[in-house]
Amino acid sequence: MVTLTSAVLSFAVVAGLLTIIPGLDTALVLRSAVRHGRRQAFVTALGIGTGSLVWGAAAAVGVSALLTASVLAYTVLRVAGAAYMIFLGARMLWTALRGAGGDAEPTPRIALAASASVRLAWLRGLLTNLLNPKIGAFYVAVLPQFIPAGASHLAVGVLLATVHDVEGMLWFTMIIFGAQAVRGWLRRRSVHRAVDGVTGSVLVCFGLKLGLSAR
């Protein structure tokens, strides 16, 4: 009989392997660390983690299963997610081409804008996760297999998603502090433009792939 402890440990291995595979989430957090610093990078990571918790709860109660079974529901989410990723990526590419951002000292107005952008960082991480039906597909395909018989699906689903979040935060923390270790080099305008260009390209490619995929 599968116990809750063995289920959590087994899921932790699967989720840990998924976490360290470079992808959209890693690109977003790294970009935030390079462009805006440690605080905004952690907020972006928290937004991503919040999205994972929502997907975990949804998979546990069957919402993700609905997306898997309903062609219309899946298509609507897929198109919305693709449009959002392409829009976000195109903005980053435009910033890279324009050469916006630099090494100038912050002014009070810039500092105020940075405070507002921290809130937007959380929302950006959240939406990027929630509008990606592939994340929902992962949870609905994998998570139910680790819920012991007789256990509360919602409670265990949220628990497993939390385990995934903790692993994600540990991984993101390594990335963020790694970026901070070479912050002098990363503060160069040319590096900012390169990071925007690469991250924007990744987002656009993800969006196009998502939008053109049949399922």
Image (spheres, rainbow, N blue to C red):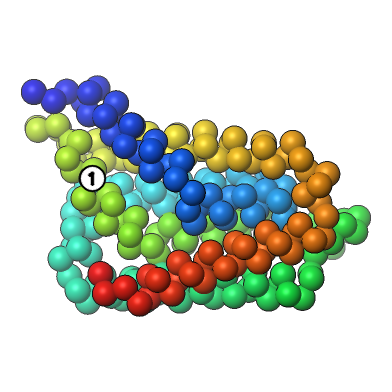
Q: Which residue is drawn at 29% across and 26% down?
A: 9
Percent x, y of residue 172: 55, 40
**Residue 58 in sight in this render:** no
- Quarter of the rendering occupied by the N terminus: top left
Residue 192 image-quadrant placement: bottom right
Residue 160 image-quadrant placement: top left
Q: Which residue is drawn at 81% across and 47% down?
A: 185
Q: Please tell me whether residue 166 is drawn above or below residue 39 in the rendered image.
A: above
**Residue 211 in sight in this render:** yes
Percent x, y of residue 13: 33, 31
Q: Which residue is drawn at 22% across and 29% down?
A: 7
Q: Residues within 10 Å of mark 1 (few under 14, many from 20)?
A: some
Task: Specify whether 100 is left or right of 212.
Answer: right
Disc 1 target residue:
142
Percent x, y of residue 12: 33, 32
Task: Specify whether 196 is left or right of 2.
Answer: right
Amino acid type of the residue that numbered disc 1 sits on in the rendered structure: Val
Residue 131 image-quadrant placement: bottom left
Percent x, y of residue 139: 27, 49
Q: Residue at x 43, y 57 (%)?
A: 129
Q: Which of the two residues, 99 or 129, is positioned nearer the viewer here? A: 99
> How many numbered circles does the render carry?
1
| Label 1: element kind | helix
- Quarter of the rendering occupied by the C terminus: bottom left
Q: Which of the two residues, 133 or 117, is positioned nearer the viewer here? A: 133
